[in-house]
Image (spheres, rainbow, N blue to C red):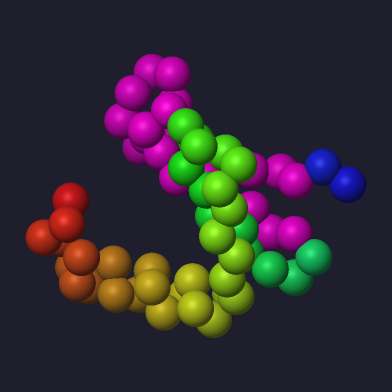
C-alpha cells in the first residue's frame, strides 16, 4: 500500500519544497520534510495531538 502524504496549503514556495508532510500508515503518524523525503519521523496520534496543541497556543512561535 502506497503512503498518502499530505502537506499544508500554507507551504511557502511554489514547488512545495518548503513544507512538512504528514501521513498515517499502519497506525503510526509519519512526518517528513518534502526536500528530504527519505528521513521519516514516526510518532503516535497522542504525541502529535499534544504537539499541535502547543503550537496552536504559540509555544513554538519563537522558532518560526
Tell me if residue 1 comes above or below residue 27 in the rendering.
above
- Please say whether residue 1 is visible from this viewpoint: yes
Which residue ends up furthest to the left in the rendered image? Answer: 62
Would residue 58 be found to the left or right of residue 14 on screen? left
Would residue 55 be found to the left or right of residue 17 on screen? left
Could you say which is closer to the camera, residue 20 or residue 56? 20
Residue drawn at point x = 60 percent, y = 65 percent: 42
Q: Position of residue 28 (x, y in %)?
A: 68, 68
Which residue ends up furthest to the right in the rendered image? Answer: 1
Q: Position of residue 27 (x, y in %)?
A: 75, 70
Residue drawn at point x = 49 percent, y = 71 percent: 48
Would residue 8 be found to the left or right of residue 44 on screen? left
Q: Which residues are magenta?
A: 3-25
- Please say whether residue 22 is visible from this viewpoint: no
Q: Main secondary structure of the magenta part?
A: loop
Q: Position of residue 47 (x, y in %)?
A: 49, 78
Amino acid at each position: 500500500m502506497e503512503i498518502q502524504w499530505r502537506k499544508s496549503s500554507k507551504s511557502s514556495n511554489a514547488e512545495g519544497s518548503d513544507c512538512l508532510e504528514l501521513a498515517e500508515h499502519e497506525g503510526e503518524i509519519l512526518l517528513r520534510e518534502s526536500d528530504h523525503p527519505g528521513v521519516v519521523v514516526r510518532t503516535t496520534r497522542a504525541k502529535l495531538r499534544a504537539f499541535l496543541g502547543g503550537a496552536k497556543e504559540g509555544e513554538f512561535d519563537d522558532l518560526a
